[in-house]
Structure formats: structure tokens, C-alpha cells
Image: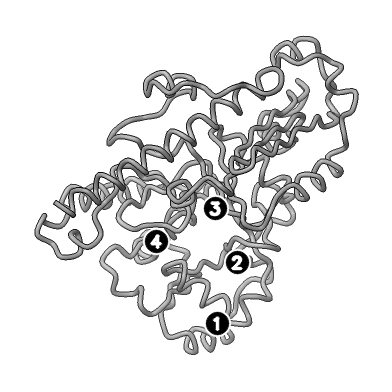
Amino acid sequence: MILQHRRERLHPFNTARILRSSLSNSRLFADHIDGLAKAFAELSFSNEAALLYPGDGSQLLDELSPNDLPKQLIVLDGTWHHTKTLFRDIPQLRRLPRVRLAPTQPSGYGIRREPHILFLSTLEATVAALRFLEPETLGLDQLVAAFEFMVKGQLAHPKSADSVRRKCRPRAPLNVPKELRNNLQNIVVLYGETAPSPNHVADSMRKCSRAPVYWVAERLGTDERFERAILSSSGLTDSFLEHLGLPLSVFADAVSIEEFRDEWRAFLRPTDTLAYYYANCTRLLNAIDNTLRPKIYLKSIQLHRGQKNGTLEELLTVLHVPTVEIHGLGRPSRRLANTIALCRYLHTCELNSTASASHSRQE
């Protein structure tokens, strides 16, 4: 069931309309907020329905037990401002259990700007949820392909150079998030390691069951450092320690996952933005901190059109970025240092880009 903000219904790139046309077992309601609230109150839906909406109190879909999975999804459609308004002003929505996704890749909806690099369009979020809830559903790949074709076609025919909007809002050469553009005072760069799962654990459960075993972070504005070893239920083999480049003595003061979570939250400030390069950190962050704290997935930043980022070491080599001084031991500290180097490089690039644009306007 899709509840659509009235202002979205005539948008030419309306992904909810594509969903309604493509999914046979779906309904779409578009109206003013009062009209949607009235319609929603009168509709009958499953008592096992859930609202697909992020935020405090929402649960990750892939962390629910099979018995707790929703049998019906309620989806809100509109800009992020519109959906927040729908959620705020329709009381029935707030009474529903809420579920959310943990995207590891940025949205492909390049036509519109998202407030966060990992926020998805209505179509992308719905398809991702259906792929988890009903993996046997046919046609989802074709639905995504149609969506990508629409986006690609629009991006291939941008507005003319004489467009007033383009003159007023020129595109930056890099899709650097505003948190990195402004300053680095409140950027916390992080990296986490997970222990290997036992061999008897099914492949489908390994990602869900992994927890951090070593965590390192640094606040760029103050150089404050956070570093913790965490107790592992699966044990630490010699080969794994060698892989980390850490001695066993480092884990002598390891803390429980609960203690680690409390210490990590105490380290963070309300104004902090978390930055990381490795996709696995997304799942680890969701496991220890389910707030909507701003996050920057650095690997998704496209430095040049068509460029695909490989490993962080390869990227730094291509960009000729020198690594910063490594504080600490082993692979965690080395990877954190490389991530810090990339953050500082992106910040410097954006400063230079802004200065060049300002100089061109003055000329």
C-alpha cells in the first residue's frame, strides 16, 4: 500500500506510479494529508502490516525472525520533507510497527538530490524490501532495469546551458557531501573488523551474526581517538590475528559488546558525522547504533564520471594521495589512516573547486 503526498502525483519521474503499474498486488492512494488520513483509517489491511520507514524504533528487515516478518508493507511516497510530514500528521502511521533497510550502495536515482547519500527512491526501497521478503517474486530485475533506463534517458538529456536553473545551481564536479565540503571539525572517521563466523554457520546467516571485534575511530577536528577490542564469541585464531596484524595481548582488555556500545555512544557528539569507506561498516554501525546520525559512505563518492572505485589503497594510488601518519597497530589502524587521507583529499578538492568557481564568477 503506497500513500503518496499530493504534490508528488504529477511529478514526471514518479516512481510510485511505476510501482503501482508493475506490482499486481499493490494499491496507490494520493491525496491531501487529511484525505490520506481518512482513507487510511477506513482501509482494511493485515494486522501483520508494517511501515517501511527509517528512524528510531524501526527494525532492520534482515534482523527479524521469520515469524515477525510483515505480510504487508505500507510505503510513503514523496520528497523526504513530504514523507516526514505524512508520518507526523497521520497518527495511524505512528501506531504501526516500522521496518527499515540497510543500504550499502547509494541510490541510482540521479535525477533528484537525496538528503543523504544512502537514501533510496520509493521504487528502490520497495524492491529491496520485496527481494528480502519475497525473493521468489518474478520481474523485480526488469522493474529495476526500467527504472534505470528512465534515469539514464533523463540524464542523457539535461537542461540546456542557457537554463536559468542551471545557471543558478551549477553542479559541483564532485558529489562530495556537504559535511565534507564545509569543514572537518565534526567528522568522525571509523573502521571496524569482524571475527570470522564458524564454518557450521549458514552463509545466509553469517552477515547477520557478525559483530565487531575491533573498532578504531578518529575525530578529525580534534584528533581525538577511539580504539577498542571487543570480546568475540567465535574466538580468535592465530591466522585471524595474523590477518589483522595484531598481537593477542591487544585483546587482554577486550570489553563486551554492551560495554563497547556504551563507550562508543559516549565518545560521539550530537553534531558528529560518521565517515567510512568499507561497506561492512554499514552493517556494523546498524548493529551498534540505530539512530539517524549522518553517515558518509566514501566509496560511493564519484570522483569522475564513469569512474568505479576499487580498493582504498588503489584509489589513493591513482589519486596520488599520500597516506597520513599511522597511529596504532595492524590493519585496522592502517585502513583508518587511509580513510582519513581520503577525507582530507576530498575536502581539499572541494575547497579548490569552490575557489575556482568563485574566481570564474568574478571574472
Give the Cα separation between the discs numbered 3 and 4: 13 Å
Label 3 vs 1, first from the N-terminus: 1
Give the Cα separation between the discs numbered 2 and 3: 11 Å
Is 310 situated left or right of 239 in this image? left
What amino acid is found at the position of numbered circle 1 in the picture?
A: Phe
Residue that carries the numbered disc 2 in the rendered image: 51
Mark 1 residue element = helix
What amino acid is found at the position of numbered circle 2 in the picture?
A: Leu
Q: Residues within 10 Å of mark 4 (few under 14, many from 20)?
A: many
Label 2 vs 3, first from the N-terminus: 2
Give the Cα separation between the discs numbered 2 and 1: 13 Å
Mark 2 residue element = strand
Q: Which mark is residue 40?
A: 1
- Reply above or below: 40 against 73: below
Residue that carries the numbered disc 3 in the rendered image: 129
For discs 2 and 4, the disc positioned in front in the rendered view: 2
Mark 4 residue element = helix
The residue depicted at 32 percent of the width and 51 percent of the height is 110
Label 2 vs 4, first from the N-terminus: 4
Residue that carries the numbered disc 4 in the rendered image: 19
Q: Do the residues labelled 2 and 4 touch (CB within 8 Å)?
A: no
Q: Do the residues labelled 2 and 1 touch (CB within 8 Å)?
A: no
